[in-house]
Image (tube, rainbow, N blue to C red):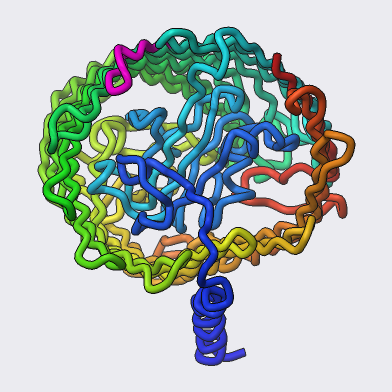
Amino acid sequence: MTKSLSFKKTSLAVAVALSLPLVSAQAAENYKAQDVVVTASRVEQQLADVNMSVSVITSEDIEQSSGAQTIADLLESNVPGIRVNNDGGQGIDRIKIRGEDAFRTVVMVDGQRISEQKSMSGVPLLIDPSQVERIEVIRGPASVLYGSDAIGGAINIITKKGGEKPLQASVSTGFNSSSNGKDASFSISGSHEGWNYRLGAGIQDHDDLDTPAGEMPHTDFSAKSADFFLSYDIDANKTIGISASHYDLDFSSGSITYANPDDFWVEVPEWKRTRGAIFGEFKNLTDNLMRVRIDVGHEQNNKLMTNHVADSMPTGQIVVPYYVENNADNKLNTTSASIQTDWQLGENHYLITGYEFSLDDLDANSSTYISLMNDTMSSKDFDGKMTRHSVFATMDSSILDTLSLNYGLRYTWFDSEMDIKVKKGSSQDSSNDGSDGKVVFNLGATWKPIENLSLRANWSQGYRYPLLQELYVDTSMGMSGGSTLANPDLKPETSNNFEIGSRYSNGSLTLDAALFYSDADDYITTIPITDKISQYTNVGKAKTIGFELDGSVKLGNFEPYTTLTLLRREYQENGIKTTKSGTPKVTARYGVRYNTSYDGANLRADVYAISQSATESHDMVAEKPTITSYGGATTFNITAGASFGPQNAYSLDAGFYNIADKKYQNNGSIYEPGRHFAVKLNAKF
């Protein structure tokens, strides 16, 4: 098939999909759809009124997800445009949205962003699924709303709080045969006379993954978590509260690139994330001041890591084996504060303004040991800080009864500094600093020509300031056994993004479609200097065009559905332009759900497949370009469950996954699980 013909067919498919809501809308013109309320726009709003692509994972989705080991597993299989980077293991996942790297996704818990300053992979999702009430995913740039890093999108994990009775409890336990994994959680919560509280704990323990290619060594993980929440409603319009959480992760990573699994492995015996926060929310303060929200928080991340790589080097007539062992001891303390005010200006204008502050304080040690002839050892201490100040304003204006505009801006200022002390090695102590400021804008419109249908269009700018690691910290982590050098002269990444989309829901048919285009510049990536040394540099450009569809139709007790992503990403780096970016051009989930009631119990089933097209990745080394290919894959799955007992307080869900035992890879590091089953039991008291 020619490229021209392929493009025409894709364009026709997109046009048909976008027109479906119009056809169905005329048939159900007088039907009032149920309201879906989200906070993705920083205020409670009906989903139909939001001029961005937003997906919601509910608490019911999480409870019934028998096969999802992590939040990322659940997102990847249910939300279009999502890919997961698992770093060759389990238990530690980063999210990629619309082809962008995980560094370009903002991760938040209860609206407060999670920081990461020393990582080669991005911000991980370190939270137990049992703590989560719902997840809102913004697909596409949200830099005006949520600041630097939101080029690809933003994820807001909203935790459980309070309850419906003065005292209630819940327990959950599960098993996953792909890793002999056991999960359990417990919580007590309640609400009484204005007080709302929750106390919870969870544990996960998983062995190495079992795949069609055999067991994947160095892929085990275990995690322990605890969370606490307490708030008091002073009156109907005033609430103050406090929250705390702790997550303790121990995991390993491996790679199938090495014939001997012990030639490469990563051990992280400790990654502890502890967070505490206080908040106050005050509503209806005056006729115009509708809400004030204040948040103050502190988070500490402690991480220990060992990266082991075995190699060999020819010396005369002899090949000498050796290994490189890199160790990291990182402590990142983040202090943050924010204030948001909501204003009703007349009948037709709603203004949101805010200020955000964060201070990241990094205290890290990196050491490298090389066992080659004369053993060598190097060690450095890093003491760095990054300060972020942001002010933003965004306005919703109703122009007509059926047409509204959304427009806004954000100004962000960064200051960074790093002191480096050499404990062992030949380099010298140094001190570095830098700063940058940037204004980004967005403009969008939402039009509701008929009932239950909303059309949206949006232009927005993206912005990402480099991490402390990219600016100042040389690192030797990874599979090559070499080093990646920092670059204090890095410029921030920027992008311009355009989207048109439509939402339609009449109670039986639900469709959400979006066509988007992104033009990004000054991408930060690494380029090789020698076979073993590379450096962060602004050399990458990317143009991405894509289409997303999330649709379902209820036919009695049956509900056929699909989530579909079509993506074409042109990447330019080091003088090479290619569409072989390592991102699948097609990913989809499609199947049929079944729901019914019998003797007071709710019964459900889901028969579905998940497909992804083959991927090719072009190595951007001009002297010797190489292409790495991974075949496409389709897995077939079936789940079933029941909710029963008084008020359906008990639920049992089970799933049979990758039934055909398909051997495939998502990111090239390891094979994904083969044929396996999982079961989960929940009980509420």
Q: Quadrant of the C terminus?
A: top right
Q: Position of residue 380 (x, y in %)?
A: 31, 18
View extreme (front): residue: 30
Q: Is residue 502 above or below residue 86?
A: below
Q: Quadrant of residue 367?
A: top left
Q: Name the residue nearer the viewer: 423 or 638.
A: 638
Q: Is residue 487 above or below residue 272?
A: below
Q: Which residue is located at x 68 percent, y 36 percent?
A: 68
Q: Quadrant of the N terminus?
A: bottom right
Q: Position of residue 662 (x, y in %)?
A: 81, 54
Q: Name the residue nearer the viewer: 93 or 356.
A: 356
Q: Position of residue 558 (x, y in %)?
A: 78, 58
Q: Position of residue 336 (x, y in %)?
A: 24, 22
Q: Which residue is located at x 16 percent, y 43 percent?
A: 344
Q: Quadrant of residue 44?
A: top left
Residue 235 part of the magenta segment:
yes
Magenta-drawn stretch, dominant element (helix, strand or loop)? strand
Q: Name the residue nearer the viewer: 470 or 636.
A: 636
Q: Is residue 566 visible?
A: yes
Looking at the image, residue 367 sits to the left or right of residue 395; the answer is: right
User: How many numbered callouts?
Assistant: 0
Q: Is residue 552 above or below residue 380?
A: below
Looking at the image, residue 153 sits to the left or right of residue 228; the answer is: left
Numbered range of the magenta stretch: 230-240
Q: Is residue 361 visible?
A: no
Residue 559 part of the magenta segment:
no
Looking at the image, residue 308 sits to the left or right of residue 240; the answer is: right
Q: Which residue is located at x 17 percent, y 52 percent?
A: 347
Q: Is residue 317 above or below residue 54?
A: above
